[in-house]
C-alpha cells in the first residue's frame, strides 16, 4: 500500500489496518513523543490524524514544551563490517568524512528513487558500481 501516507502541518503518518480490532491506526512518525489515533471508518482517517496533530500541538503549548520536529537528521544504521570498511576507504579517498559520504550516497539514492517513481532497482547497481570505481 503506497498511498497510505498523510501529511499535515509538517507531520506525517502511515495509516495501517488492524485486522484484529478492525480499525485503521496511525501515529505521528519521526518524533520522540508518541502520538497516535484510530478510527473505524476510512472517511474519518484524515480528520482523526489532523485532530491528533492539533491536540499534540495544543498540549505542547499548554505545558510549555517545544513540539518535536520530524526527523532530527540522526539515525543509526547497521551494515556489514566489510561494507563499513569500504565506505570509510571511499570517504578517505574523497577527502570527506564518513557522515558526508553517507549523506551523499543517501541523497543520490533518494533522488534516483524520486526520479524513477520510487523504483530503486537501478539505484543500488549504480551505487555498487560507483563504490567499485572508487576502489580501483
Image: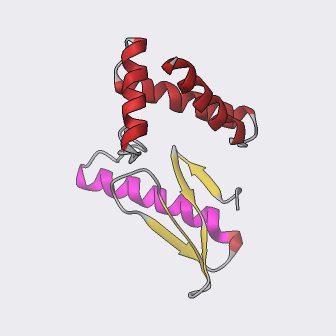
Q: Nearer the viewer, residue 26 or 87?
A: 87
User: Which x, y percent locates residue 32?
Assistant: 33, 54
Left-right relation of 94 to 13: left
Most common secondary structure along the magenta stretch: helix
Q: Which residues are magenta?
A: 44-64
Above or below, 76 relative to 113: below
Q: Residue furthest bottom?
A: 20
Q: Residue furthest front?
A: 136
Locate the N terminus by quadrant: bottom right
- Kindly identify the residue that appears in the image at 34 percent across and 20 percent down: 97
Left-right relation of 56 to 8: left
Q: Quadrant of residue 83?
A: top left
Q: Residue furthest right?
A: 117
Q: Nearer the viewer, residue 28 or 95?
A: 95
- Kindly identify the residue that appears in the image at 61 percent across and 84 percent down: 19
Above or below, 89 relative to 66: above
User: Which x, y percent locates residue 86?
Assistant: 42, 30
Asked if residue 126 is among those painted magenta in the image, a careful observer would answer: no
- Kindly identify the residue that appears in the image at 43 percent across and 21 percent down: 90
User: Which x, y percent locates residue 29?
Assistant: 47, 55
Above or below, 18 relative to 121: below
Q: Nearer the viewer, residue 22 or 105?
A: 105
Amino acid at each position: 500500500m503506497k498511498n497510505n501516507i498523510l501529511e499535515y502541518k509538517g507531520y506525517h503518518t502511515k495509516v495501517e489496518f488492524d485486522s484484529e480490532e478492525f480499525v485503521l491506526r496511525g501515529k505521528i512518525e519521526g518524533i520522540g513523543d508518541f502520538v497516535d489515533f484510530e478510527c473505524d471508518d476510512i472517511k474519518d482517517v484524515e480528520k482523526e490524524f489532523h485532530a491528533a496533530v492539533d491536540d499534540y500541538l495544543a498540549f505542547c503549548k499548554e505545558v510549555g514544551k517545544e513540539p518535536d520536529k520530524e526527523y532530527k537528521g540522526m539515525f543509526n544504521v547497521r551494515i556489514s563490517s566489510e561494507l563499513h570498511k569500504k565506505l570509510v576507504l571511499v570517504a578517505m579517498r574523497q577527502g570527506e568524512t564518513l557522515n558526508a559520504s553517507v549523506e551523499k550516497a543517501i541523497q543520490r539514492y533518494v533522488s534516483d528513487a524520486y526520479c524513477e517513481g520510487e523504483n530503486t532497482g537501478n539505484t543500488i547497481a549504480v551505487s555498487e558500481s560507483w563504490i567499485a570505481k572508487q576502489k580501483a
